[in-house]
Amino acid sequence: MAEWSFLTNHAQALLCIAHDPGSRLIDVAAALGITERRAYAIVNDLTKDGYVVKEKDGRRNRYEVQGHLPLPGTVVRSTTVGEVLAVLVGDGGTAVP
């Protein structure tokens, strides 16, 4: 039987970034079981569409999830990214506004 997930790789990458805004692409890739190149493409998609803001922090990048934005391509457009992340990540640790 083929393996599948309720959350897309984009959603899982967003969770990784919300949990640790200083995540490196190699960390995101390892957590998702994908290549670093694919992780780069996913984070680039999230950045390009405004769901993540990337800023330089020395030699590394830090990411800020834009939790106020609505979920993309869904019937439930009144639900924000931050509301979903709050449920999935919990109170324990994120800088999701």
Image: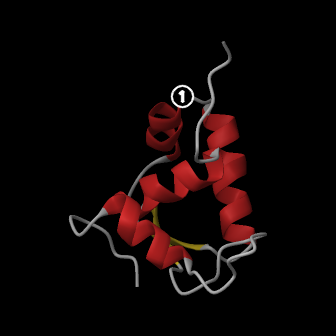
- Which SS class for mark 1? loop
Q: Report the quarter where the N terminus lies.
A: top right
Q: Which residue is mark 1?
A: 33
Q: Is residue 20 visible?
A: no
Query: In this image, 7 relative to 58: left or right?
Result: right
| Residue 35, picture quadrant | top right
- Report the side of 65 relative to 92 (left or right): right
Determine if residue 86 is in view.
Answer: yes
Front residue (pair 54, 65) = 65
Give x and y (percent) for residue 23: 41, 52
- Which residue is painted at 69% across and 82% down in the image? 77
Q: Amino acid at mark 1?
A: Gly
Q: Is residue 80 above or below residue 26?
A: below
Question: As displayed, is residue 92 above or below residue 83?
Answer: above
Q: Nearer the viewer, residue 66 or 63?
A: 66
**Image quarter of the C terminus:** bottom left
- Image quadrant in which you'd find residue 66: bottom right
Q: Quadrant of residue 75?
A: bottom right
- From the viewer's perspective, tell me whether residue 70 is left or right of residue 55: right
Q: Is residue 23 left or right of residue 10?
A: left
Tell which residue pokes out farthest to the left in this image. Answer: 92
Residue visible at 21% across and 64% down?
92
**Residue at image location 78% in from the left, 69% down from the top:** 73
Give x and y (percent) for residue 95: 34, 75
Q: Residue at x 52, y 45 (%)?
A: 25
x and y percentages locating residue 55 in the rendered image: 51, 73
The 10 Å Cα crowd at callout 1, few under 14, some 14 to 19, many 20 or more, is: few
